[in-house]
Amino acid sequence: MPPVVDAKGRDLRSVSAELKKKIAEGPVTIKGAAHLHGLVAGFKSGEVTIQGNAGDYLGALNDGATIHVLRNAGNYLADNMTHGLVVVEGNAGYGAGAYCYGGTAVVKGNAGDFTAVMNKGASIIINGNVGDEVATYMLAGNLVIVGNAGKNLGNYLIRGDIYIGGEWESLGHNTLLAEMGESDLAKLRSHFADHGIQADPASFKKIVRKSEKPFYK
Amino acid sequence: MPPVNGTFCVTVMKDRCINASMPGKCATCVEVCPHDVYAIDDSGNVYVQNYNACVGCRICAEFCPEDAIRINPAESEFLVRSPWTFPQIEEIHYKAQTGQYQLRGFGTMGSYVPSFDSITIVPSQISSPPPRDKYREECNMEVVIGEGTCEHPIRLHYPFVFPAMSFGALSREARMALAIGAAQTGIISDTGEGGLVEDETWLIKGFENKERTLKRWEPGGYLVVQWSTGRWGVSADYVRAGDAVEIKVGQGAKPGMGGHLLGAKVTAEVAGVRGIPVGTDALSPCRYYDVTDPADMKHMVDLVRDITEYKVPVLFKLGPSRPYEDVKACVEAGADMISIDGMVGGTGASPAVVTQGVGIPTLALIPPAVQALKDMGVHRKVKLFVLGGMRNGLDAYKAMAMGADGVGFGAAAEIAMGCRACMSCSTGKCAYGICAQDPVLRSRLIPEEAGNRLANFIKATAEEVKILTMLSGHDCIQDLCEEDLRAMDLNVAAITGLKLVGYEKRLPWWENGRAN
């Protein structure tokens, strides 16, 4: 049984200090942490399980740790992550996977508005629906949405690929529908197998950018 | 109404003019000018027959095949043609031809912005503490940032910083020069939002090599890493690389907008540091996508402190908006220092209309910002630095006497490195290699030489502050106060709340402390 850090009634500093000590010895579980914002930020290694819900900014600047949330996560999940894996069994709030440079973030439920905004290289996989303005100004990486999306999907997409299994309310500026190729199908199959997602890659649509310089000519 | 006459000087450069060497061969200026400024005699010689008739349309200059004609205003165009000055006309032409608005570098230009030049310093005489001897006595200029809030507060040798100027906007060589200059003077160099040039991390500490075995410069400076709305090059390692983390909310040159780096300057090197495709425009968002209410900002500060293990100060940078409320919000979020950047502040690229016409003058930001700190009981504890058009020791002294703890030199630092304020920063064609990414232009900037120039500038400016501090009766910059200043006109007295020269009192609505 991994050691358990009880975060109830404690502040970020004290929980973080205890977590850093214990994680050096192996996986750690945290409970009672829904009130903490910025938990497990900037870790380079280790494995952390959050029992129950997680607050905002969970796994911000994650640089190699594996973080598993057993219920829901707050806003800004894995904000600016560079390496590592973050998995949420439930839903995530606003801005999941914002500003990431690398790593993988998986939300088994739904995610909110501005998911994957300014993604610069991570793989962000949402097994449910997402809100509006998703993947705004995405510059690299992959976004996979198994369900539906809201308005302005991929607004001012610069690079990277968006894959969507459901429908969208509207596509954003500078987006194009593209043909799915074998490499795209293989990529989706791999992601789905890794994270236990039941979906058929062949039914997905691919969205790419129209121009790399949509602002100033 | 007829055009105003006699307002232009017509110059024909004879060494270029075809007609001057071959009379009768060219008379384009005669043909195109509808006002008979030029004439041609029987021998085919063209001459200016009536310069008083010139209306400044410049059609002769535009059509001259040898570019031999210059039309310059005899009086300032602001006196005789405002608002339709030549720059304004050219701007409209540009938009009409291209369908795009103008972008440029630097900050607000022109003398209409209220400035520190309208403030004078009150020297000591007989009724106040005597002046101190600049040549034989000491003056304390140290500023400490983050005392009591972190393990490693910053102790600035002088009350100055090199504010945020990003790699990308600046060349790698300019970034290195700023680090060397800061290392020699014990002050801050701020990375700006372009990520980190690795060399800066050892140069700033005075080492000339990565292994940090060769120490060249004392006392060593401080590297501040900026955390911005674009998060270019940001990672946990980046955040931990600094002696402080600065959270950028805005900047003086383009408040309400994010950073601009145009594709022409996004080379492979810049793209590699920022993590974006080569040649794409790097346009930072105008706001944080991961902050939707004030509580989020506090949480962001908390996570930055946690990632840096509570070792370093957290700074904020504000653009010129509502200084009282904005400073209060930064204090509530947990700032150790707040830099407030006035509308005169510069940039590498911004829409010209924003740079020229948006924001609050630097001068006018200080009183409400200081009042906010005082009302919250943290003046001199949470440090306030003023940026935006700071030029010399006079400006620095005045800002500090108004309540700031220090100032930043951005444009002045670039000028110290060799800049001539041509405002072409956004094009990447900086002739001095400061704002260029072209390797040929960059080779003109030698980091150590430029770093030495920066250090010279800082030291000379510090001496100016010392002179002014001591002649006004103080031996510590923290003792400077508003009583050491006088406003020289009603406008500045109204804006700043300083006593008006002659009247020797504050204007009535300032008498009770803060204007309503």
Image (cartoon, coloured by chain):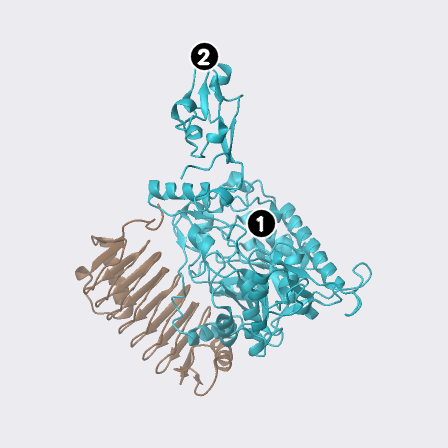
Number of numbered discs visible in the structure rendering: 2
Q: Chain of mark 1?
A: B
**Rendered view: B112 above or below B288:** above
* Chain letter, brown: A
Q: Chain of mark 2?
A: B
Residue shown at 64% from the left, 47% from the top: B448
- Does B106 sit left or right of B395 as displayed? left
How packed mark 2 is, by other alpha carbons closer than 10 Å (few <14, some 14-19, many 20 or more), is: few
In the rendered image, the residue lying farthest to the right is B136
How packed mark 1 is, by other alpha carbons closer than 10 Å (few <14, some 14-19, many 20 or more), is: many
In the rendered image, the residue lying farthest to the bottom is A9
In which quadrant of the rendered view does residue A162 lie? bottom left
Residue shown at 68% from the left, 54% from the top: B214
Q: Is residue B382 visible?
A: no
Residue shown at 32% from the left, 61% from the top: A136
Residue shown at 41% from the left, 44% from the top: B91
- Please name the residue that numbered disc 2 is placed on: B42
Query: What is the x, y in percent for residue B468?
Result: 72, 60
In terms of sequence position, does the residue under pointer 2 or pointer 1 come before the other? 2
Determine the secondary structure under disc 2: loop
* Chain letter, cyan: B
In which quadrant of the rendered view does residue A106 lie? bottom left
Query: What is the x, y in percent for residue B366?
Result: 57, 66
- Does B263 sit left or right of B137 as displayed? left
| Residue type beneath disc 1 | Glu
- Please name the residue that numbered disc 1 is placed on: B414
Query: What is the x, y in percent for residue B229?
Result: 43, 62
**Rendered view: B73 above or below A188:** above
Residue in the foreground of this view, choosing between A112 and A43:
A112
